[in-house]
Each structure stands twice: as structure tokens, then as C-alpha cells.
Amino acid sequence: MIIGTPRHKATLAKRYDTIVIGSGMSGLATAACLSKAGQKVLVLEQHYTAGGFTHTYTRKGYEWDVGLHYIGEVHRPNSTIRRIFDYISDSGLQWAQMDEVYDRIYLGDESFDLVTGVERFRAKMLSYFPQEQQALDRYLQLIRDVNASSSMFFLHKALPNSLAKILRLPLCRRYLKFAEQTTADVLLTLTKNAKFIAVLTGQWGDYGLPPKSSSFAMHAMVVKHYLNGASYPVGGSASIARTIEPVIQKSGGQIVTRAAVEEIIVEHNKAVGVRLQGGQEIRAKTIISSVGVENTLGRLLDQATIEKHGLKRQLANIEPSMAHVGVYIGLQASDKELGLATSNLWLYPDEHHDANLAAMKQPGHKFPVIFISFPSSKDPEWDAKFPGKSTIEIVAPAPYEWFKQWQGSRWQKRGKDYTKFKQELQDTLLESLYRIHPQLIGRIHFAELSTPLSTDHFCRYKTGEIYGINHTPRRFQQKWLRPATPITNLYLTGQDIVTCGVGGALISGVLTTIRVLGLWRSRVLLTMLKPKRSR
Ligand SMILES: Cc1cc2nc3c(=O)[nH]c(=O)nc-3n(C[C@H](O)[C@H](O)[C@H](O)COP(=O)(O)OP(=O)(O)OC[C@H]3O[C@@H](n4cnc5c(N)ncnc54)[C@H](O)[C@@H]3O)c2cc1C
């Protein structure tokens, strides 16, 4: 069978064991793990390129990634994440560690560095907040406690239903105790110092919710993820799909782009295949969806199946995460010439994270956070590929409502008002960049702004949500956010069933594979998930 648009045709094999919908980190990880177990896997991706939020795009001789600025743990050869990446890429994926300061937090004009290594992190924090030693030590202990209990909580998701029911309490109780509290609830038991709390939660943009609404477990996992430093994929984030694809192909599988799934075909409550936009049907024994739970259970199934299992009711318990605007910048000079380092910058107006986000109802109000990343400086291969050039990316929250009036318009044809609005937002964000790096004034050669409509267009998140489902305490109480679904042979994977982040999506792929293959046939994966003792 041949599928795809006339210009991008792909010839399919006669039979596949599994179809994976979506080629983001989770879809690729699931496909590669199943391929390693001997399965022939077909990955169907609606975009023109593979990778989901880890894809890259090029314009005017520059290249940008869209959803990966840094990742923790991968530079430690024995970490779970690194071992899984090595496994699914046959060690093809390489990592470049960033400088000692992975994040710099600005509260107004004051800045605070988050530095690599627990002891150095602790010493740095004490240099800013010498009165907070007791609170800091208790905080670091809590971070360790949450992370020690997290692996059992997530592994529990991969167990067969009957076993999962019996073991839920013993395996999940400890983690849920942390997950069901907000970050503010926990931190306020340690200290009343608002500035100290604002610095400790200065990475809230990594999981999309400020302290009063985020789950403390989510906060703690992100903090721990980066405590030992951060890295960037050598060659940019497109290296992820590039190095994993051959592993899928080795077992006879393939990734097909421009192949949007319109419906999951269900017969007698069993998923048997998919129908693509255009009407073509492809069948396989197992169907795995990585496109988000709202898309999968609310949009890709037929109405009768949705109603039969009360899926709309279930979906009412979750909410989408925030949407964002992104500015993609190209400069005609190298990072060294421009004095740009690898550290990410987080710009906050002041220490009132929750109030600032709540106030951002109208455009024109200050952005509650602006994140600035220097991807070209992080990639050791950049200078050889793009000599004399560099790139910068800016990310900031922006409610979908700001763009709702252009919903349904076509990409790049959304009209003059839209272009004008985008220009205003871009100018505001560039001013923030110039405040930190005035040497860049007059040096920008190319810049363009993406909106939540772009996120929907390229990755199919209906309200432009940046991280799938919001990471509230309530999210972690949803027992149904797991690989198995009420439909036989239909499984979920992706950030929604674990957490957002490339690491979260990666682990979700492993958990879904374990659920599909069963515990015995997943011994290699289970070994990789086994927590290692670390500080
Ligand atoms: C701006 C931004 C910055 C980020 N920065 C970081 C960071 O620095 N570090 C980090 O760890 N994480 C970061 N993240 C988060 C991280 O990128 C995501 O959590 C993770 O990549 C999600 O992977 P996924 O496989 O679950 O989903 P996705 O990557 O969204 O993959 C889903 C795929 O399914 C495809 N699809 C959807 N519908 C269909 C359909 N009907 N048919 C076929 N295909 C379909 C989509 O096109 C997409 O390719 C960032 C995210 C964003 C948006």
C-alpha cells in the first residue's frame, strides 16, 4: 500500500505488529523498544517531519528546535534516562553538557544562579540566603524523598489492571502524599521568605504552573532532574529522531510523515487499525497513541465508544496546560563573537509568580515569565554546520484566548491584524532580551514569532497547550492516566501518562512497552528503570 500526499508517498509493508500514532519522544521510544523486542512497527506522523516537540525547522539558513532547550541526567552514563536513550538509539545519540550554571533566575534586576551539583547548588543558595540553611536542607531532603518514591508510582502504571489495583496503595501512597499538595503548600512549611521561594520555584515554566497551583511532586522531579547539570543533544534536537529511526527500521518498521490519523478503528471494543485523513485504512494487532489523551480518547474514537466508556466524563477531570509564544532569532555572528553562554535565562518581573500569571489576562500586561535559550551555543556541531551564525529562542506564556479570533484561519494566511499583533509581542520580548544582552541591539538578522495556533497547526494541541495536561495535584489522582485503556489492544503513551518533559515522554514510552509486552518480556527495560542510589 502507498500512503501520504502526492509529493511524499511512502510504500507500506503488508503487515505490521503495531501502529504508533505520533512520532514525538514518546512515540519514537515506544516504537524503538518494541522494535528491539522484534516487532515490526509503523509510526504515523501528521507533520512533514518526525520528532513531535523535538523536531527542528529551518528558515533563511538557520535551524531552531521547538521543544527542547535542555535535559538533565543524560550526561551521567548510569542514569535511567541515559541508559534508555543509549538503548533506543543504539548509542547513536550523543550529549553535550552545558556550563556549570544551567539556569539563571532574574527577579527584576537581581539574578540568582542554579549551579551543577547538589553541594554547589546548596552553597550557592546559601550565599544568597544565608538565613535559610535549615529550610534549604529540609527542602533538599524533600526533593530526594519525592524522587525516591516516584519510580514505584510510575512503574505501577505499567502493571496489569488486576495487579495494579491490589498494589496501588503500597506502591503509590508515598508519592501521592507529595503529589496531592501544591508546591506553595509544602514550601511555606519550610520558610516564609517569599524571595527564597521565588528562586527555588524559578523553573516553574518547565512544568507550566506557579507554586500555588502546581503539584509539589512535579516541582521536585524537575528540580532533581537538573540538579546535577543539564545537557543538549549533539546536532540539535532533530538528532533524537535521526538516531532512533534506524532502530525501528532494523526490525522492518518505518516512520511515515504527512500521515494524519483521523480515527482509531474499533470493532467489538477491540482496536484493530487506523483510518488516515483521506480514508486509507491500515490494520495492526496493537494500536498505540502518543498524541495526548484529549486527542486520543476525545477525538480519535467514534462517539459510541466514547459514550460506552464515559470518556468525556473522565476527560472533564483534567485541564490543558498553558499555551505559549516563541521567538526564533537568527544572528550573523557566532556565539563567541556575541558573548553568549549556554545558561538559560528566566526573567521574572518580581517574586510574585502566581499573582503575575493570574494578572496576564490581557495582552499588554507584563509577561509573568520570559525564558531565553541560546541553542547554537549548546551544540558542539553548530559552528561547523552554520559558521559565523548563531540562534536564540525566547518562550513566554500566552493565553490561547488572545488568538481565538484567528482560530480556523490558515497558517501564514491569518491576516494583517494577526501579523501586527505578533509584531507587538515580538518587540516586547526582544526588549527583554536587549535588557540582558544590550550588545545584541542592531545585530538580529531574522526573527519570527510562533503562537498557540502554530502549536496546534504543527503538533495538534487544540488550545496550543505546551505541556499536555496541567500538572496540578488533581492530575496525579487520575488513575486512568496509564498505558492501558478500556478498549482492548489500544494503549496510550506520551507526556500525559507520565509528566511533560522529554525525559517524561521517554519514560512513558518504556512504560507503555512494558504494558504491551508484559513484565517477563520486558526484563531489559525493567532493569533500566531500577532506581540507582544517588544524592
Ligand atoms: C516550547 C517548549 C519548550 C520545551 N522545552 C523543554 C526542555 O527544555 N526540556 C524538556 O525536557 N522538555 C521540554 N519541553 C517539553 C517536551 O518537549 C515535551 O513534554 C515532550 O517532547 C512531549 O513528547 P510527546 O511524545 O508526549 O508528545 P509530542 O512531542 O507532542 O508528540 C506527539 C506527536 O503526535 C503527532 N500527532 C498529533 N496528532 C496526530 C494524528 N492525528 N496523526 C498523526 N500524528 C499526530 C504530533 O504532530 C506530534 O509529532 C518543551 C516543550 C515546549 C512546547
Image: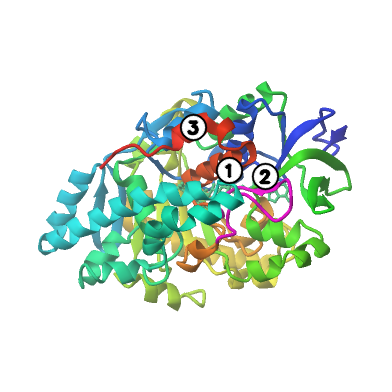
Q: Residues under labels 2 and 1: Cα distance?
A: 8 Å
Q: Position of residue 235 (x, y in %)?
A: 49, 30
Crowdedness near tag 3: few (<14), some (14–19) or many (≥20) residues, C-alpha within 10 Å: many
What residue type is disc 1 on? Answer: Ser
The earlier-in-sequence mark between 3 and 2 is: 2
Q: Is residue 448 visible?
A: no
Pick the front one: 488 or 422 = 488
Secondary structure beneath dot 3 equals helix
| Horizontal arrangement in the rendering, residue 347 relative to residue 109 (left or right) | right
Q: Is residue 405 visible?
A: yes
**Does the segment drawn in magenta span residue 244?**
no
Secondary structure beneath dot 2 equals loop
Pick the front one: 335 or 380 = 380
| Residue at 27%, 61% in the rendered image | 199
Image disc number at residue 85: 3
Q: CB at mark 1 closer than 8 A to ligand 1?
A: yes
**Does the segment drawn in magenta span residue 486?**
yes
Q: In which quadrant is the C terminus drawn?
A: top left
Q: Which residues are magenta?
A: 479-497
| Residue beneath disc 1 | 26
| Residue at 55%, 50% in the rendered image | 163
